[in-house]
Amino acid sequence: MPYPHSNIPETETEPIPKQEESINSPGTGEIIKHSALFIITFACVTFFGIFWVGQGENAESYLDMWPEGALFAALLLGFLATHEFGHYFAAVYHKVRVSLPYFIPLPLGIGTMGAVIKIKEQIHSTKKLFDVGISGPIAGFIASLLILLYGFITLPDPSFIENFSGHEEITQHVEQTGAFPDEPPAPPEGAGVIILGDTILYSFLASFFDDVPPMYEMYHYPFLFAGWLGLFFTALNLMPIGQLDGGHILYSLLGYKKHQNVARWCFGGITLLAGIEAIPFLYLQFSEWIPGFEISSTVIWALVLFFLLRKGFHGAYEWIAPVWTLSLIGSVGYLYFLGDGLDQAGSLIWVFWSFFLVYFVKIEHPPVIYEQRLSPNRRLLGWISMIVFILCISPSPISVIS
C-alpha cells in the first residue's frame, strides 16, 4: 500500500533535540574502515582507468600508464567525495546522525559503483530533508563542472589521439584534415565502438571550444570523461524518485501526494528507456540461440515490466495499467519507427536502474512528520536542481556499435 499522508499541519516548529552533544564524531575504527574503502576504490579506479585514459601506443607495460589512471581516479573520486561530504556536512549542521562516506569498489567498468552515506535516523522535517538532500548535488555539480571546464580549456589538438593504440584510421584522418571524422570508423570483426551519450549541458559547453573530441573518443580525455561522469551521476541522483536526492528535493517542494504522482510518471519514463535497451538485447539472444522466436523479446519485456510496476506501485492497478501501456508503446514505437532497429543493442543501464529503483530506492518517498513550506530561496534552488537534472541526463548514456 502507498504510505499514508501525514495529517500534521504545516508548521515551522520542530521538536527540541534531546541531546545537544556532538552526535557525529566518528571513532578511530570508523575512520580506518572508511579510509580503507577509499584506498581500495582508488586503486580499483586507477587500474580500470588505465583502460579508458591510458596512452598505450608508446607504453611498454600497464605500469607506464598508472599515472594517467591515477589522475582519472583522483578526478572521479574527488567528485564523489565532494558530493557525499556535501550531504555529510549538511547533516552535521542539522544535527542528523550520519556516517562518513562509503566508497564502493567494483572490479569492472570504471572501477567503482560510487559512494554513499548512511543517514542513521529518520529526518522529521522537510526543511532538514531538503537541505541534506540538495547539498550533495550542488557540491558535486560545481565540482564536476569545474573539472569539465578545465578539460575543455586545456584540450590538446586532435593529434593527441595518436597516443592511443588501435586508432590508425582515425589518426590517418586527423593527419589529412586536422580534425576528427564525424562518424566513427567501422570496428574490426567481433569488436565494437563505445559511444557516450551527449547531454544538453555538455553539448552547450563544448560549442565554445575548438578541438573537442567526438563522443566516441571523449573517454580518452581524463578531465572530460570524469567531468561527464560527474554530471551524469549528479543527474541520476537528482531523479525525483523515492529517496534519491531528487526525491528528497521534490518531496520537500510538493508534498507527499504530488510527489507520488510525479515519481510514478518519472519511473514510467525510465522503464520506457529500459525497454529500448532490453527488447533488442533479448531479440539478439533469441536470434543466436533460438531462431524464429525473436518476437518473444517484446512479450518477455512486457511481462517483466508488468511485474516491476506491480512491485513499484504496490499493486495500484489504476496506475499500473496506463504506465505499462504507455511505456511499452513508447519503447516499441521508438525501436520500430525512430531507432536503429532491433539488431543494435546498447548497454542495459536503464534496465539495471529500473530494478535498482524498485527494489532498493523505492518509487515513493516515505512521509515526513513535519511538512514545512520552504523559504523562497530554498524553493528557487530546488527548481534549479530539477533544471540541472534535465540538462545533465542522457537518454542513451552508453551505446556500442559493431
Image (cartoon, grey):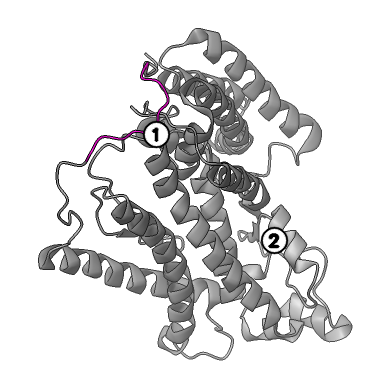
Residue 102, x across and y down, in percent: 29, 58
Horizontal side, residue 311 vs residue 154: left or right: left
Tell me which segment is drawn in magenta: 7-16
Circle 2 crowding by C-alpha within 10 Å: few under 14, some 14–19, many from 20? many
Q: Nearer the viewer, residue 146 or 353?
A: 146
Residue 55 in percent (x, y) is at 56, 83
- In the foreground, 339 or 394: 394
Q: Nearer the viewer, mark 2 or mark 1?
A: 1
Examine the structure image and report whether residue 8 is included in the region drawn in magenta. Answer: yes
Identified at 50% across, 9% down, the residue is: 317
**Amino acid type, label 2:** Tyr
Image point 73% across, 65% down: which residue?
205
Residue that numbered label 1 is attached to: 12
Whichever of labels 2 and 1 marks the residue nearer the N terminus, that label is 1
Disc sitting over residue 202 in the figure: 2
Left/right placement of residue 172 relative to residue 244 reads right
**Quadrant in the picture for residue 294:** top right
Verify whether residue 207 appears in magenta.
no
Q: What main secondary structure does the magenta stretch of the protein show?
A: loop
Residue projecting furthest to the top? 318
**What's the mark number on residue 73?**
none
Which quadrant holds the C terminus? bottom right
Frontmost residue, 115 versus 5: 5
Q: SS at mark 2?
A: helix
